Image (cartoon, rainbow, N blue to C red):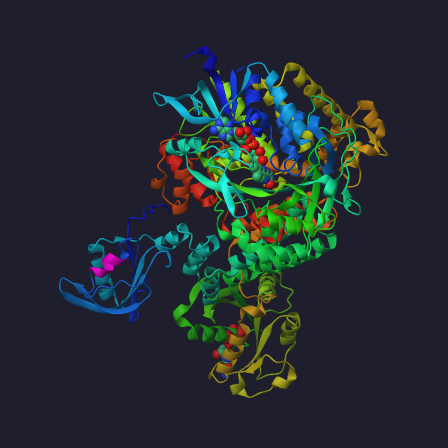
Amino acid sequence: MKKDFTYDVIVIGGGHAGCEAAYISALLKAKTLLLTINLDTIGETPCNPAFGGAGKSQIIREIDALGGIMPRIVDRSAIQVRMLNTKGGAAVHSLRMQIDREKYRYEMKVTLEKIPNLYVKQGKVKNLLFNNNELSGVICNTGSTYYGKKIIIAAGTFLGGKVILGETEYNAGRYGEPGSYSLSDNLKEIGFNTFKLKTGTPSRIAGNSIDFSGLEKQEHENIDQNFSIWEKNTVKNGRDCYVVRTDDKVHEIIRQNIEFSPLFKGIIEGKGPRYCPSIEDKVVRFFDKDSHKIFLEPEGNNTDEWYMQGFSSSLPEKIQNTMLKTIKGLENCHIFKPGYAVEYYSIDSTQLYNTLESKNIKNLYFAGQVNGTSGYEEAGAQGIIAGINAALSLKNKEKFTLSRNESYIGTLIDDLILKGTQKEPYRMFTSRMDNRMIARQDNAYYRLSEKAYLAGCITEEQFDIIKKKTLKIKEVNNYIAVNKVKNKTFLDMLKTQNTSLEDFPDIIKKFELTFDEIITIESDVKYAGYIEKHNKFLEMNKEWTEKKIPEFIDYFKIPNLTIEARQKFKEINPVTIGEAGRISGISSSDITALILYIRKIVKW
Amino acid sequence: MSFNINSNRTIAAIATSVVGSTIGVVRLSGKNSLSILNSIIQKKINKPRYVYLRNIIDNNEIIDNAIVIYFKSPWSYTGEDMVEIQCHGGYVTMRRIYSLLLKMGAEPAQKGEFTKRSFLNGKIDLTQAEAVNSLINSSNTVLADNSIKMMNGIFSDRIKDLREKILEIIAFIEAYIDFPEDDVDEISPEYLNSNIQRLYNELIVIKNTYSIYKKLKEGIKVAIAGRPNAGKSSLLNACLKEEKAIVTHIPGTTRDVLEHTLYINGMNVTIYDTAGIRSTEDTVESIGIMRAEKTLMDSDIILHIIDASVEFTSEDKYIYDKIKNKRKIIILNKIDLGKCLEKSFFNKDNIVEVSLKTGEGFDNFECLLQNEINIENFVDNDFDFFIDNERYVNSIHKVVLILQKILDEINKPLEYTAEDLKDAKDELGSIIGEIYHDDILDKIFSTFCLGK
Ligand SMILES: Cc1cc2nc3c(=O)[nH]c(=O)nc-3n(C[C@H](O)[C@H](O)[C@H](O)COP(=O)(O)OP(=O)(O)OC[C@H]3O[C@@H](n4cnc5c(N)ncnc54)[C@H](O)[C@@H]3O)c2cc1C
Ligand SMILES: Nc1nc2c(ncn2[C@@H]2O[C@H](COP(=O)(O)OP(=O)(O)O)[C@@H](O)[C@H]2O)c(=O)[nH]1
């Protein structure tokens, strides 16, 4: 074994999961190799040129609180900033940024190149290597072998990937890039359950062929917001997006050509996400809707490519072309790249622990779309958790996990390991949270940074910034609880619906509060009742939810357990009672039966 | 109750009473149901849900001629393979068949095991399982009829329906929040208000049906009132004689009020015989009278007995005025002695003339009494079922409070309403004992066309 080819951690795949995993692992001083099929597609955003939005902005802020890289790269490459859901309170506020796709890739690549301990390399992994049944490294299709103690697979849509466009289909990881077939077979051989999923993307069209006049504009908002707290970036000359609408002409074309749709012909077997339906899917399923909204989003400042959000299609290019031309503003449009669908294999994420390590094969981790999720943020979230755990376990440090209650990332991973994604690719929504009033985009740092600091993911200086902010917020909380205007404390005033901290500019000035700090203070007051109720509920159940289920348990021996529960438990092998209760199809009486039985066989 | 549900065990039980019926049912549930059946009949059967007439054979001897039906899993009560043997009634035959089944490999079912299996196999929900239990424990036919409705899911269907309606509102809100860029309209406070109000009203109606159950459990209270010698004891005796077989004697706690429980119209009826009620100066006696008056006022029906062979006395009038606003039957007694008081004197409907001595007119009285003893007379609401478990009341009460809170704060940002509605939804789910996963997202995607 040459030392050159030996690493602590090997990350397979330079997508959003892989980049995040490799970055944090190197930061935690593990000698890390990032292997990816093509160096120039590191950080590629194959779908929307946008990050954030409902359920996702919260994830990005959490990644930032954990010291990840995605938030900074998004800020650096942003070309439009907007805050969504401002009619509601902070629990639903969601920051969204349109990015320059080329810039994003570039920034990610050059950033990673410069990180100490991180070795980026072009190479396509063919097989995992084992030594005495222990994972020892990977072999690439060039024959190069790399040894590593921990391996993180972040192969995205590439496992067994197939691109489908109209009546043609061919092997590919995504448009213009080769897929990963031997690695896919290899994973099946070593015991992973895999299943097919599908996703799709709309066409990109030439800006100079679009008639923007008279189109509804969606403007860049001049707000002082970043995803990352660690560096300051400002969007200069923010770009606008545009809205067009389909009408019956498009729908008629689809109805007449539905026979050419691979989806309806049955060429596509994989389950696609309901939240990203193709335009043909929308028209067929919601036939009474007479118009669908389409956003035109610029893909960057140096390119004339425009992304058509809401117009995913895998119909033949000719039909896509005819459809587009019936839309107002697109009468003369030129397609740069037609929309297409991609079908790929995911592994069954219920075969993983909440560290994203495989339950069957030690030292092997999975992160990103390979686990059946979809979305850059979801991929990044898993990347950072897998990366931290791989690096920490090298030094036998305690595992790093987040709970559902403190984070979106915790909820994401909990859902993955307990529910799996066989039904459809998993995307985060704010409604997936047990209580979104607690975990918000404005307070990610107060929730997670201490943990991140203790694990070594953020520096002393970084943590100091958070500590200072925490202290300041505490001071403000004390101040408003004691000081009064007209016999009423500021706190009591804030509790009423239409009062905001911004109504008291003196306080803001006195404490030099930032926009996010104002939101945090105010929301904690407004949501107090709900937060308390939720915490009480957790406290009440804590005695049980955190109890470990003995490993030797035989679920088929438990009296009064429904047949379905026995099978589910055996399949998923929950680690704690709390996990057991969150598996779908499990009822409260199943949990009672389980607890009673365990109490009989072991001293808890 | 705890026993091993082992799907390898095939259980057998006698399902109907072994006394007093001409036909009885013995049944089997479990994997080997069909093979065990086929081992005791002459010509084997295999089609599920077909009715076969077969001889039951034990040691080459025909022990009965019975109808046998095979139910194939999961389309059976327990969700397992099941067999029903409809044999001739009576202890001997049924016992013989039952023993034969055990000999062929079936095992005795434990108490409630069929229902338990049904629950464990997901055939019935929690309220339905509870209904089976309350059916077995029903003390009267009205309760039993209701339990059967509950068992068939009338209540859980209503709860599911209400839960579904809440889910729809949540989906509306969540789609608006989670898809801020799509065509989802913001839910208006007016829409919210009217929908929540409707749910609120429906739940209150259901919650109030519990008073019916409570009324039925405690029974209908009937008090006999009348001045001394009007014929109160005679009336009580006449009533008790009619119902002799099922009278239970509960000695009154005081000698001022005696109570007896009868069974009329499928309901428990307690008759209180109050001592004479009149105005008095005597303090000791007046304590007794006060107690009697209280019994009178607490009762559901008063039987006011009046000696009609004499003039309407001031004592009669004293009682008559006291109970002016109560539901009652006026009994003009002693008509054998000649009528001094006429029905027309009272200008009332519920009035009957009898002679408790000769028995004349007593059947008219019984008719009147039976009409009065109808649960609908004692509850304010129309109902097609009533809830019979405190657990349901508590849960519904919690939901009602949550909905009230939403109505009070109808203009708050939608994430508040959503949070409250989720609590309400989960509480309703807990009544049925089901935990739902991803139901909100499922609802969103089946209702709205969303996504990029
Ligand atoms: C056509 C298409 C449409 C999409 N539509 C949507 C959408 O509508 N909504 C949405 O939220 N998301 C969508 N996405 C998904 C989104 O792009 C991904 O979720 C996200 O990029 C996943 O990140 P990842 O890191 O898991 O994988 P990827 O970004 O796919 O990265 C995988 C990486 O692994 C590398 N790799 C693969 N195999 C090997 C190997 N054997 N050896 C070395 N390297 C390897 C690849 O080169 C690649 O760099 C779409 C993706 C595609 C391709
Ligand atoms: N002739 C006649 N006597 C009756 C009738 N009903 C009751 N009595 C008699 O009236 C007396 C008082 O009856 P009782 O039932 O003890 O009255 P109470 O004091 O109201 O309980 C008894 O002697 C009864 O036998 C009736 O219908 N006709």
Q: Is residue A327 magenta?
A: no
Q: Nearer the viewer, residue A280 or B221?
A: A280
Q: Hey, which residue is sitting farthest bottom in the picture? A: B338
What span is colored magenta in the figure? B34-39
* Direction top: furthest residue: A3
| Left or right: A65, with A271 as reference point | right
Answer above or below: position of A64 versus B34.
above
Percent from the top left, x then y, of residue A374? 56, 37
Q: Is residue A355 visible?
A: no
**Is B307 left or right of A229, judged from the image as shown?**
left
Q: Quadrant of the N terminus of chain A?
A: top left
Q: Please report the residue visible at 44 percent of the width from the left and 62 percent of the height from the top.
A: B139
Where's the C terminus of chain A, which quadrant?
top left
Magenta: main secondary structure equals helix
Count of numbered marks:
0
Residue B37 shown in magenta: yes
Q: Is residue B239 visible?
A: yes
- Where residue A248 appears, x then y in whole percent? 67, 57
For this rendering, which residue is in front, A13 or A66? A13
Residue B139 appears left or right of A405: left
Residue A603 image point, x, y percent: 39, 30
Above or below residue B53? Residue A554 is above
The picture quadrant where one finds residue B315 is: bottom right
Q: Quadrant of residue A533?
A: top right
Residue visible at 65% across and 82% down in the picture: B347
Q: Give A244 or B198, whichever is nearer the viewer.
A: A244
Q: Nearer the viewer, residue A510 or B13?
A: A510
Residue at left offset 84%, top offset 29%:
A505
What percent of the width, then of the height, locates residue A153? 48, 28
